[in-house]
Image: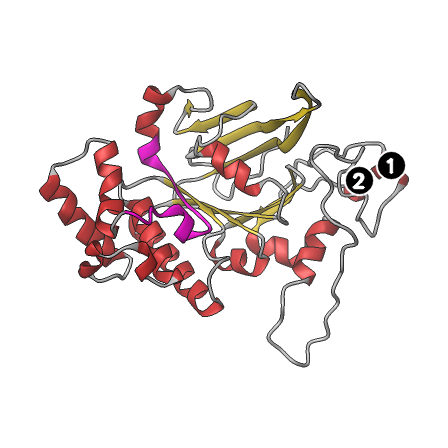
Amino acid sequence: MSVIPLVNSSVSPLLQVRDLKMHFPVKEGVFMRTGKYNKAVDGVSFDIMPGETLGLVGESGCGKSTLGRCIARLYQPTAGEVIFNGTDISRLGRKPLMPFRRDIQMIFQDPMESLNSRHTVGEILEEPFIVQSIGDKAFRRQRVKELLEVVGLPARSVTRYPFEFSGGQRQRIGIARSIALNPKLIICDEPVSALDVSIQSQILNLLIDLQKEFNLSYLFIAHDLAVVKHISDRIAIMYLGKIVESGVGESIYRTARHPYTQSLISAIPVPDPHHKSHRQVLVGDVPSPINPPSGCAFHTRCPQVMDICRSATPALSADRQPVSCHLYNT
């Protein structure tokens, strides 16, 4: 098991994920018996420091969102550890987990789906305080006004419903809800992918400003490396439930090692009409996590595949830019 190296190893990590797995049972046959498992997350390890952003990148279906939900304990992991501030929360029950829910929050991809359409914005933002039994009604109302101000929405928004706002405004409401209890870690599950490009930059800048103001740590999940580059200190590339490469943001962009990472970077558009593109197009789709390929999971699409790739699974190297590829392990 190799862990993504930290930029500053002198400080204790806020979050430590160790060999985390999330295998969903697949029911088959007349009697709906479990015959196989969907290995959505299959042995992932990394650390996140206080005030740091780790970008997690990969195609749809690679297990990014499932990993985030396991850390937030929306899912019960199959195996592994999620150590938050020195405590393994991966097996905690509902009651002992409650205090940690204040410190770990989540921003979802679709703000319309994640906000209760029957509640006003005021009711939505008051709910975290009610669930955690914090403050009286006057305190909660004052705190809601402050939250709206922090995310750039007018105080009159408290009486309006989510459908009365634009997509970007709804995501601001989701962000306000996520910071309501002064958390230490926020899991951002593709928070800008459903927004227009012009609005994406506004939301990203808001997240950066909030991070500086409240010393937040982010796990920023996305499929767009260009977006991740703007906000992340370190980047991890995920493919079919595993981390295949990781490192400091600029290093990943300058010297990508894994063929999958190289392909993702080649797909980033360059705003220069004279730039000659060297796009590395991948053939085929991500294999099924129910029946993953033998050996290296990427070998069915890799342009540099070797015989060893079809039979042996490469380990994640233990250097400054870990990579799981036989090109560097042989």
Q: Residues within 10 Å of mark 1 (few under 14, many from 20)?
A: some
Which region shows up in magenta? 101-118
Task: Identify which residue, 7 or 171, lies in the foreground.
Answer: 171
Residue type (three-letter) at the residue carrying disc 1: Ile
Tell me whether the residue at label 2 lies in contact with that at label 1, contact meaning CB atoms closer than 8 angstroms. yes
Place of residue 181 in the rendered image (x, y in percent of width and height, measured from the top left): 27, 40
Task: Identify which residue, 190 or 261, lies in the foreground.
Answer: 190
Q: Can residue 167 be seen in this view?
A: yes
Is 261 inside the magenta-drawn segment?
A: no
Residue beneath label 2, please?
Answer: 326
Q: How crowded is mark 2: few (under 14 residues within 10 Å), some or many (20 or more)?
A: some
Tell me where residue 39 sits by quadrant: top right
SS for dot 2: helix
Q: Can residue 209 be seen in this view?
A: no
Residue at 59%, 75% (x, y): give it: 271
Residue beneath label 1, please?
Answer: 308
Residue at 34%, 61% (x, y): give it: 169
